[in-house]
C-alpha cells in the first residue's frame, strides 16, 4: 500500500495507524490534508500492520532557544527532525542583553520558519535588579504592558521574582496584571516553594512552574492548580523525580527542556522524554497528553491535535515502542522532515539560510564593552576557610560550604561586560574538577556577563581575554590547545548551521574533558552559577551572593 499520496488537486493523503489522543484510542485510517488543514480522517480496515503510526507533534513546554546557540530558524529546522512542531519560548536571555530589540529579533527569526513558536514577554529583565547584577537592558512594567498587546506574544515569561509576588511588589504585580488583562497566561519559576507560599504564588495568577525538582514540590504545585513542566534539559534533569505526575495528573503536566545544548539538541528533543516515559511503562495517551495536548490547550496555540479541521501538524513514527523512530514531520500540511531524506526539509532549510544570511558575522546586537584583564585583576589572598559554591551534575541548585581551599576547588570569575573598566569578581567553586585548564563564556544566566572557571589564574585570564577579543562566545583551554566558538549575536547565538554549532561545541567539550572536567553539560552548568534566583550560593558581577538570605558575602 502507498502510505502517502499527493493528489493532482494539491491534497495530501496519509494512511496508517492513527493515534487519537483526544479520544484516547488508536485506529487504522486515512488522513486527508487540504490547504494546510486536516480535511477529514476516515477509518479503514485494510491498513497493514507495518504501516506508520501518526500522532500529534510534540511541543516543548518551556525553552530558551538562545541556549541552543542557534537562531529560531535553525532551532526549528533541527527540532522538527525529532518530531517537535512547536515550542513555548521565553526570550529573556537575549532580552537581558539588548532588551525589547532582542525580543523582536527572535520574533523576526521565528516568522521566517515553518514552526509553531509561541514567544512570551520576559518578566524579569534583569532577574533581580542592578543592586544584585548588571544587565544590558531593563524591561519594566510599561514595556511589558506594550508587548502584551502584540498578537505574537503569547504569555508572560517565567516570573522568577517570586519574593516580589509574595510581597506584592508593585512593579512585579503590574507586570502580572498586564498579562492577565490581556488574557494571556503567566509562567512561573518558584524553586522550593510549597504550602501556603505556593498557594499565594498561584493565586496571583501564575499557572505553571518548571522549577519543581522533587515529587513533593510537584504534587503541591498540582494541588494548587498549577501545571508542572517536567524538565529534562542538558544540565537540569527532573524527569526521574517528577515522572509519576504523568499518570497522576496528565492534564497538569507538560514536558520541556528549558535549556538544550546544541550537542544534545542534534541528538534528540522531546521525543527522548517520550521514549523514556514509554520505557518506564506510562500510558502512551497520558504521555502524549503532556507532550502535545496540555501546552496547546493551556496557551491556546493554533497547533493541530490530529482532529478534522485542525492545522495539519502531526508526525509519523515507525512503532509505539520506547525505540520508536521519527519518520516524517508535517507542519501546516507541509512535510518539513522525512527520514528517507529525499526532498526533505528543503523549504525549511531555505528559510533558515535566508534569515541567517542577514545576520552572519554581525555584532550589531552584542552590547560588548569589556576590556582585557590581567592576572593581578583576579589575584586573591585567601587564608583559612572560604565560602565555596558546590556545583552538582544534573542540577542547577548549588550547595554552600565553608572550608579551607583544597585541590578540588577552583576559582570562578564573573566580569561585567556592559560597563567599561569594570573589575572582575572572584569566588571559589567545587564540582568542576578542572586539573589543568580553564573555560570562559558570555553565557551567564540571566544577565550574560563573562563567566569563567579554571585551574590557575594564567589560564583563566587567557580564556577570558579570548572571549573579549571575539566580542562574545566560548573559549576553552586544556593547557595546550585553545578551542573556541564565536557567538556574535548577543554573545549567545551564531548564524552558522546548527550542526556546525553542535560540532564546535563538541570540540569545546572535549577540550574541557581533557582539562579534567567531566560534567555532562559543563557549559550550561557554568552558565547557571551566576543566576541569583536559584539556591543557594551564586557569583554575580557584584559579588558572592547567598541567595537564601539575599545578601552578599565577603570572603
Image: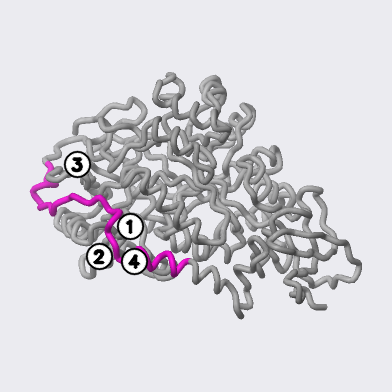
Circle nearer the N terminus (1, 2): 2
Q: Residue furthest right?
A: 45
The label nearer to you, 2 versus 4, is 4
Residue contact at pointers 4 and 1, CB within 8 angstroms: no
Q: Which mark is residue 360?
A: 4
Determine the CA span between mark 4 and mark 3.
32 Å
- Residue on which the image places disc 2: 478
Residue 336 vertical position relative to residue 235 in the rendered view, above or below: below
- Residue on which the image places disc 3: 425
Label 4, secondary structure: give it.
Answer: loop
How many residues crowd mark 4 within 10 Å: few (<14), some (14–19), many (20+)? Answer: some
Determine the CA span between mark 4 and mark 1.
9 Å
- Residue on which the image places disc 1: 489
Dividing the picture into quarters, in which one does residue 55 lie? bottom right
* Observer-nearest of 534 and 32: 32
Q: Give the magenta-colored segment's residue range.
A: 352-380
Residue 172 vertical position relative to residue 421 in the rendered view, above or below: above
Residue contact at pointers 4 and 3, CB within 8 angstroms: no
Residue 479 vertical position relative to residue 539 in the rendered view, above or below: below
Amino acid at each position: 500500500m502507498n502510505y502517502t499520496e499527493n493528489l493532482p488537486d494539491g491534497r495530501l493523503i496519509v494512511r496508517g495507524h492513527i493515534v487519537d489522543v483526544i479520544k484516547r484510542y488508536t485506529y487504522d485510517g486515512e488522513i486527508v490534508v487540504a490547504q494546510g488543514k486536516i480535511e477529514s480522517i476516515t477509518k479503514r480496515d485494510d491498513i497493514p500492520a507495518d504501516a506508520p503510526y501518526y500522532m500529534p507533534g510534540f511541543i516543548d513546554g518551556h525553552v530558551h532557544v538562545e541556549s541552543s546557540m542557534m537562531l529560531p530558524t535553525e532551532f526549528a529546522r533541527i527540532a522538527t527532525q525529532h518530531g517537535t512542531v512547536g515550542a513555548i519560548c521565553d526570550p529573556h536571555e537575549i532580552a537581558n542583553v539588548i532588551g525589547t530589540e532582542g525580543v523582536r529579533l527572535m520574533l523576526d527569526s521565528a516568522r521566517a520558519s515553518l514552526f509553531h513558536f509561541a514567544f512570551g514577554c520576559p518578566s524579569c529583565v534583569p532577574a533581580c535588579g542592578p543592586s544584585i547584577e548588571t544587565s544590558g537592558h531593563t524591561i519594566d512594567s510599561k514595556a511589558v504592558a506594550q508587548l502584551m498587546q502584540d498578537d505574537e506574544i503569547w504569555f508572560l515569561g517565567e516570573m522568577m521574582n517570586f519574593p516580589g509576588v509574595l510581597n506584592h511588589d508593585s512593579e512585579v504585580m503590574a507586570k502580572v496584571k498586564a498579562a492577565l488583562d490581556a488574557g494571556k497566561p503567566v509562567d512561573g519559576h518558584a524553586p522550593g516553594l510549597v504550602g501556603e507560599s505556593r498557594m499565594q504564588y498561584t493565586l496571583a495568577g501564575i499557572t505553571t512552574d518548571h522549577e519543581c525538582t522533587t515529587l513533593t514540590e510537584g504534587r503541591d504545585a498540582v494541588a494548587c492548580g498549577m501545571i508542572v513542566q517536567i524538565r529534562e534539559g542538558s544540565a537540569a534533569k527532573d524527569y526521574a523525580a517528577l515522572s509519576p505526575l504523568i499518570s497522576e495528573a496528565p492534564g497538569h503536566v507538560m514536558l520541556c527542556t528549558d535549556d538544550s545544548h546544541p550537542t544534545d539538541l542534534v541528538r534528540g528533543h522531546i521525543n527522548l522524554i517520550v521514549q523514556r516515559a514509554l520505557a518506564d511503562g506510562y500510558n502512551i495517551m497520558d504521555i502524549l497528553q503532556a507532550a502535545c495536548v496540555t501546552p496547546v490547550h493551556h496557551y491556546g496555540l493554533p497547533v493541530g491535535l490530529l482532529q478534522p479541521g485542525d492545522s495539519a501538524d502531526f508526525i509519523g513514527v515507525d512503532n509505539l515502542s520506547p525505540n520508536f523512530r521519527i519518520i516524517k514531520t508535517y507542519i501546516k500540511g507541509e512535510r518539513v522532515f522525512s527520514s528517507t531524506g529525499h526532498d526533505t526539509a528543503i523549504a525549511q532549510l531555505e528559510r533558515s539560510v535566508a534569515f541567517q544570511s542577514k545576520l552572519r558575522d554581525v555584532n550589531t546586537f552584542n552590547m560588548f564593552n569589556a576590556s582585557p584583564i590581567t592576572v593581578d585583576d583576579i589575584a586573591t589572598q585567601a587564608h583559612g576557610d572560604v565560602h565555596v559554591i558546590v556545583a552538582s551534575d544534573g542540577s542547577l541548585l548549588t550547595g554552600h560550604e565553608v572550608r579551607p581551599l583544597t585541590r578540588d576547588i577552583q576559582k570562578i570569575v564573573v566580569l561585567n561586560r556592559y560597563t567599561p573598566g569594570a573589575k572582575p569578581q572572584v569566588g571559589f567553586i567545587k564540582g568542576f574538577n578542572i586539573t589543568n585548564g580553564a573555560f570562559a563564556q558570555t553565557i551567564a544566566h540571566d544577565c550574560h556577563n563573562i563567566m569563567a572557571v579554571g585551574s590557575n589564574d594564567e589560564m583563566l585570564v587567557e580564556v577570558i581575554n579570548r572571549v573579549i577579543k571575539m566580542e562574545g562566545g566560548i573559549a576553552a583551554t586544556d593547557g595546550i590547545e585553545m578551542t573556541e566558538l564565536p557567538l556574535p549575536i548577543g554573545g549567545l547565538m551564531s548564524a552558522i548551521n546548527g550542526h556546525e554549532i553542535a560540532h564546535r561545541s563538541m570540540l569545546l567539550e572535549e577540550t574541557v574533558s581533557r582539562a579534567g572536567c567531566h560534567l555532562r553539560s559543563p557549559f550550561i552548568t557554568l552558565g547557571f552559577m551566576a543566576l541569583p534566583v536559584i539556591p543557594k550560593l551564586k557569583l554575580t558581577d557584584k559579588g558572592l551572593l547567598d541567595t537564601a538570605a539575599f545578601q552578599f558575602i565577603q570572603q
